[in-house]
Image: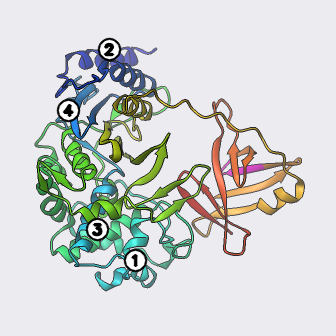
Amino acid sequence: MTRHMVRFVALAATAAAAVSAGAVQQTSPPIDVGRIDAAALEELASTRTPGAAIAVIRDGKVIVTKGYGVSNIETGAPVTPEMLFRLGSTTKMLTAALVVGLAEEGKVQLDAPIGTYVPDLPPRLSRATLNQLLSHTSGLRDFATMFGLHDDAALGQTVRTLGDEFFFAGPGEVFSYANPGYWTAGLMAEVVAGKPYADAMKDRLFEPLGMKRSTLRPTLAMTYPLAQGHEQAGAAPPVIIRPAADNVGNWPAGSVFSNVEDLSRFAIAFMGGGVLDGRQVLPAGVVARMSSPHAEIPGSEPVSYGYGLDLSTDRGVRMLTHGGSRSGYGSSIAMAPDRLAAVIVLANRTGSGMPRTARAAMAIALGREPAPEPPVPPEISMAAAEMSRYAGAYSQTEKPEIELLVQDGRLMIRQGSSTSPVLKLGERRFGIVRPGAARPQEFFLVPGADGSIRFLFRGGRASTRM
């Protein structure tokens, strides 16, 4: 362990011991906070994540808010529960709540073309509906730009550059995660609300919910305790990202600043049908529409997408979840609405959503042990004719990005300069064999209307067969 990492781990442990445990209240049976502590500290150290904050909700009440590690690797300042982090894609459930709220008021129709509300859009984008944009079924390809312009006009400017070449599939053909769809939905909310997206979020969502510190605006966030965003590469210690990444054109997909206390209020209201502190702060229809399935996510498990939420079942318990990753930060939010239980985890390293900690905390909130990782299914043999049916190039652009090919009698996958063997694990389910990896990385082949393979689906995103 390097001298920098020794100091980092020492800072994390010291800060975890020194920071206030926030609101740790006992219920029956009591929460085993020590198990959460152990999971969080282990995951911070193993992933070189400087710090994290967590909230646990049981029976519709916050029973744990706690900070771990450091908010700034240079100063060693501890993470506290009220500290702001930038969320990443968990922002999408908040943007969806704003947009669906406008639909509940009759100001927009979710199945109407977006061009009905937003002028001067490129032709294909103008025909996309809010339902398609919010459910990732518009056919838009995915990308995000962390650094960009800082004024409110940048959102409209960015969305209006999304010409027809930014579509790789037809509307409704396949689920494929696409940040630009949420930029566009956010612009619609801005136009219909008659105020910048950041102000619409403040007036129509944050203030009614009592999310007192949540904001899109960096110059407001910096006036509160703020966890600095870090990145880490290879064996090097984490470093603060300077300058901090910001791009107003991408705000609706992943840029809210919030803390576990504010997000707990959103989760409690959402699980309670929009009621918080005895008041209806979200229309009940918003909750119902967001948590209803609007798209099937390809995969081996039955998972659907609502609006800004993954919808699944874990050992008989209905789950609403979403993760977030952006420059400097990661997050995860999981709700079990039928049990009024939720877990919120925010972290200050790029892509660190602390999944092991989140799973451990949710298992504790639900009063059960975490589910064991499912075994890798045995490999299924493939004949040469079958492999040849899958072979080809797949992409979201005009340039091939992924290629399936047959070499020496077995199916291989090539991406960039890397070529790896492929295992067949089930019906249209495959695994990529990576050196040193404990499990194969899975992907799925999705047929089109004629039954032939049309898409390769991996990591939430689809690529069209070229």
Task: Tell me, yes or no, whether the two marked residues, 3 and 2, touch with CB atoms within 8 Å.
Answer: no
Marks 1 and 3 sit apart, C-alpha to C-alpha, by: 13 Å
Q: Earlier in the sequence, mark 3 or mark 4?
A: 4
The answer to if 379 sits in the magenta stretch is no
* Mark 1 surroundings: few (<14), some (14-19) or many (≥20) residues within 10 A: many
Marks 3 and 2 sit apart, C-alpha to C-alpha, by: 46 Å
Secondary element type, mark 3: helix
- Residue depth check, mark 2 versus mark 4: number of the one nearer the observer: 4
As shown in the figure, which amino acid type bears the numbered disc 2?
Answer: Ala
The answer to if 416 sits in the magenta stretch is yes
Left or right position of 389 against 102? right
- Depicted 1 relative to depicted 463: above or below: above
Q: Earlier in the sequence, mark 1 or mark 4?
A: 4
As shown in the figure, which amino acid type bears the numbered disc 3?
Answer: Val
Secondary element type, mark 2: helix
Residue 347 image point, x, y percent:
33, 36
* Mark 2 surroundings: few (<14), some (14-19) or many (≥20) residues within 10 A: some
Q: Residue at x 40, y 77 (%)?
A: 129
Mark 1 lies on residue: 129
As shown in the figure, which amino acid type bears the numbered disc 1?
Answer: Thr
Task: Tell me, yes or no, whether the two marked residues, 1 and 4, touch with CB atoms within 8 Å.
Answer: no
- Closer to the camera, 407 or 22? 22
Q: Is residue 336 visible?
A: no
Marks 1 and 2 sit apart, C-alpha to C-alpha, by: 51 Å
